[in-house]
Image (cartoon, rainbow, N blue to C red):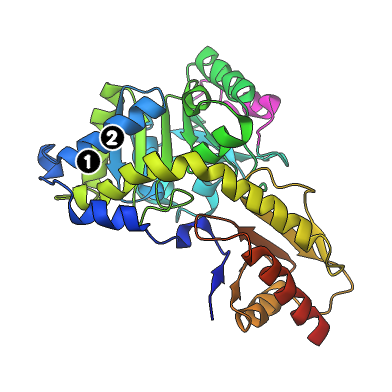
Amino acid sequence: MKIIDLRSDTVTKPTPQMRKAMASAKVGDDVYREDPTVNRLEEMSAALLGKEAGLFLPSGTMGNLAAILSHCGRGDEIILGDLAHTFLYEAGGISALGGIHPHTIPNQSDGTLRLEDIENAIRPDNEHFPPTRLITLENTHNRCGGTPLTVEYTHQVGDLARARGLKLHLDGARIFNAAVALNVEPAALAAPADSVTFCLSKGLAAPVGSVLCGSEKFIAHSRRMRKMLGGGMRQAGIIAAAGIIALKTVLPRLGEDHATAQRLARRLGKIPHLQLETDTPATNMVYCALRENVPLEAPQVAEKLRQYGVLVGATSQRRFRLVTHYWIEEGDVEKVGAAFQKVFSAS
């Protein structure tokens, strides 16, 4: 039985072309800056995002942490959303390892932070307060339905940051999904940010890795942070080769994942037991919830769906997240809908 795994786009396996590239990759010691494949990936990444330099890291969590450690010192404060991945899902690394204080403000339903809330969160120069150093945004925004932040909004936040002497970091784990959804160049979305990360192992289907981009001076500092965090790699070109193939072959077809998500949403919308959070997914994530009259909880439904070869994420007792990706085919949509209906009919 084929398993249809919609829990995340991190579950993707490398494509055959990636496996071939990994097997034949030219490698060297990346800590010595001698791995030609890593160097090429970093150059490609920086060019795509309009930055001077890039840094290959094992994960997006390390990328965000290295960036924030580069921007901030112990006792400094960053402003970020209360639903931000860095705040919720990165093990408190900025506080535990960096002594950096998170100041959370509410994420709006579209993933944005209100400019007024950002302004009000900036600390005055007072010995009683931690100094505000950084604003962090997330694009696309995971917990807010996979919504993309627009070029215009990101520029507004960037302008505010510069006016107040702050830096802007963009957690762009899925920034290429945002660019496709908005029909803009990725560099346009990253332009207002002093630093930006993106993940190769999510919708881009590479097996591992993320890239942090920024100015040459910033990346030189972040390289030191990567080493401090244990992220210095040796013959990393073997995995960087998959990232290069991802940027060349998977990035251009991300719109197909969005179209699949829209078809999936329409199919789930026909099931009376489910309530879609949005009529049309903004990118590759479909969020839905159980209606009040359904006696089951979301984790129970998810467990029952396993019997039919369908894996979904239960993000709360009543809420699901389903993420489309490279390995979800058009015919899988009907199979997922049918599996949900079987579970509800048996309950």
The residue at the point 28 percent across, 34 percent down is 42
Q: Position of residue 217 (x, y in %)?
A: 26, 22
Using a 10 Å C-alpha cutoff, classify the residue at mark 2 as few (fewer than 14 neighbours), some (14 to 19) or many (20 or more).
many
Residue 125 belongs to the span the image colors magenta: yes
29 to 322, vertically: above or below: above
Query: Which disc is residue 42 wearing?
Result: 2
Q: Is residue 293 left or right of residue 216?
A: right
Give the CA distance from mark 2 to mark 1. Answer: 6 Å
303 to 22, vertically: above or below: below
Q: Is residue 40 left or right of residue 178?
A: left
**Quarter the C terminus occupies:** bottom right
Q: Position of residue 239 (x, y in %)?
A: 26, 52
Q: Which residues are magenta?
A: 112-126
Q: Are marks 2 and 1 in contact (CB under 8 Å)?
A: yes
* Residue that extends furthest to the bottom in the rendered view of this protein: 346
Q: Is residue 321 left or right of residue 239?
A: right
The one of 336 and 189 positioned closer to us in this rendering: 336
The residue at the point 58 percent across, 64 percent down is 6
The one of 130 and 252 positioned closer to us in this rendering: 252
Query: Which disc is residue 38 wearing?
Result: 1
Q: Position of residue 195 (x, y in %)?
A: 41, 29
Q: Quadrant of residue 54?
A: top left
The one of 153 and 71 positioned closer to us in this rendering: 153
The residue at the point 82 percent across, 60 percent down is 275
Q: Quadrant of residue 286?
A: bottom right
Q: Would residue 109 be seen by someone viewing this image from the given angle?
A: yes
Q: Amino acid at mark 2?
A: Glu
The residue at the point 44 percent across, 48 percent down is 204
